[in-house]
Image (cartoon, rainbow, N blue to C red):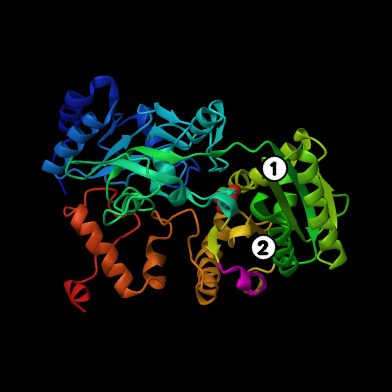
Amino acid sequence: MHTLSPDRVVVALADIVGSRACLASGPDTAAFTTDYRGIHHGKAAAVVLPANTRELSRVMAWCHAHDVPVVPQGGNTSLMGGAVPDASGQAVVVNLRRMNQVLEVDATNDTMTVQAGVTLSAARSAAEAAGRLFPLRIGSEGSCQIGGNLSTNAGGTAVLRYGNMRDLVLGLEAVLPDGRIYSGLRGLRKDNTGYDLKQLFVGSEGTLGIITAAVLKLMPLPRSSAVAFVAVASPAAAVALLGEAKKMAGQSLTAFELVSRPALELVLAYLGDASSPLEDSHEWMVLIELTSGVDAEALDQTLMQVLEAGLEAGLVLDAAVAASGADAQAFWRIREEISDAQTRTGGSIKCDVSVPLSRIAPFIEHATAAVLALQPRARMVIYGHMGDGNVHFNPLRPADCTAPAFLSACYEPVSHAVDSLAHAAGGSISAEHGIGVAKRDDLTLYKSPVELALMWQIKRALDPKNLLNPAKLLLDAPSVDAFDS
Ligand code: 2HG
Ligand code: ZN
């Protein structure tokens, strides 16, 4: 705890970044201290917008010397409250939005070097302008930033083919809590020179250092795509169809997304101007996308073969194949808007779990039964990235129940039931959204004492004063005994 007044903090940091880039707490800073869903509200001593790594390094050195906590922030799109300060008003928020330059696109090396504040959509556009694909694809791409994508190891709808953010980074630059700069902006696919330090920062949710720039992998830009919205008999049928699709489409299988009936109904009601791609109502659907460098006709044929095999095996009940780019976009819009539809409806319990594919169908069945035993009228909004085993299992309040009433009665028991079933099935309680503050207490239930002690040892090695994004991801340090055992 420091005892500096906010004014003193503002004056000192304005001296480093300039007064226009150092905001005192007030109405102007509300957008930096509240998450975009309006669920997590905090207070900051100041909000700082550094222009470059050197400035940030000086900001961090000053905060370190004066015991001032720092909360790193990108596009502030975290679903877990990971990018906003607590209510104490002690912390400085460092927002990276001014560091938004694409520094280099090296098409020959298939890499791109960007500053952390580049939005995901700007990074994708810069790659595309050079005839390449940067393949991370998530709904918030217009606002989320590469630094945030890296520090949360973002996933999204193309992980099945291209991997998570962790798989898409070759080099990194980060400022450490004491202001030192880790410079690892290398574009190498082979570099066996010891510990892979950059990966420490990926997925550490801004608790070890602030990522300032990265070298990202680029892929060939696909020339064609084929998309279908498919009714399947059950989650087990979806898994079997996924197996067929992998076999027949190989590398071109890019996305395989699950959508439950309540998820579809919710998003259609929310959008108002969209309709289901399928004539009848079905309990379970999948959105399949193939992309490749071959011509569209060949890809369409492959998709048809997958669907025919699925029909013959009784896995597929009906299918709508996109006849145009506009159709494909309309199918994807339905999938991408599910999350916002939940936010606007309110009263959604977000469980972002992953389970090995071999166990995902029984997991969905058991978790559904457990939730319905607690609240028989909960709307089972279940969807997500079936292709990589990641299910957004998000029970929603019954239509006639208010969000506060549903959440206060059901949040704890539902999250606990779903997370513990996922854990028992060999899964994770946070597949892609991270821990932040929302899952911080639960983490201690599902990580072993050894894992927690190791995480704390790494945290202490890099941030001995516990000043960087404190109380996010990790809350209470284990006792000293736990480190020795
Ligand atoms: C998605 O896949 C996002 O749409 C958001 O990860 C999921 O809001 C959610 O639970
Ligand atoms: Zn997702």
The mark tally for this picture is 2
Asked if residue 280 lies left or right of residue 446, the reply is: right
Residue at left offset 33%, top offset 44%: 85
Asked if residue 415 lies left or right of residue 270, the reply is: left
Residue at left offset 63%, top offset 47%: 345
Residue 332 disc label: 1
Please state which of the two labelled residues, at mark 1 or mark 2, is closer to the viewer: 1
Residue pointed to by mark 2? 378
Asked if residue 484 lies left or right of residue 129, the reply is: left
Image quarter where the C terminus lies is: bottom left
SS assignment for the magenta stretch, majority: helix
377 or 199, which lies in front?
A: 199
Find numbered disc 1 in the image and state the secondary structure of the residue it sits on. Answer: helix
Q: Indicate the position of residue 215 as horizontal and vertical percent values.
A: 39, 39
315 or 32, which lies in front?
A: 315
Residue type, mark 2 in image: Ala
Quick check: is 362 in the magenta stretch? yes
Residue at left offset 41%, top offset 45%: 169
Quick check: is 426 in the magenta stretch? no
Query: Does mark 1 have its CB less than 8 Å from ligand 1?
Result: no
| Mark 1 surroundings: few (<14), some (14-19) or many (≥20) residues within 10 A | some
Residue type, mark 1 in image: Trp
Residue 296 disc label: none
Which one is earlier in the sequence, the residue at label 1 or at label 2? 1
In 3D space, how far apart are the residues under numbered discs 1 and 2 (Cα atoms)?
25 Å
Image quadrant assignment for residue 113: top left
| Mark 2 surroundings: few (<14), some (14-19) or many (≥20) residues within 10 A | many
Magenta residues? Answer: 355-367
Q: Look at the image and tell me whether residue 407 can be seen.
A: yes
Q: Indicate the position of residue 129 as horizontal and vertical percent values.
A: 55, 25
Tell me: residue 20, above or below residue 380.
Answer: above
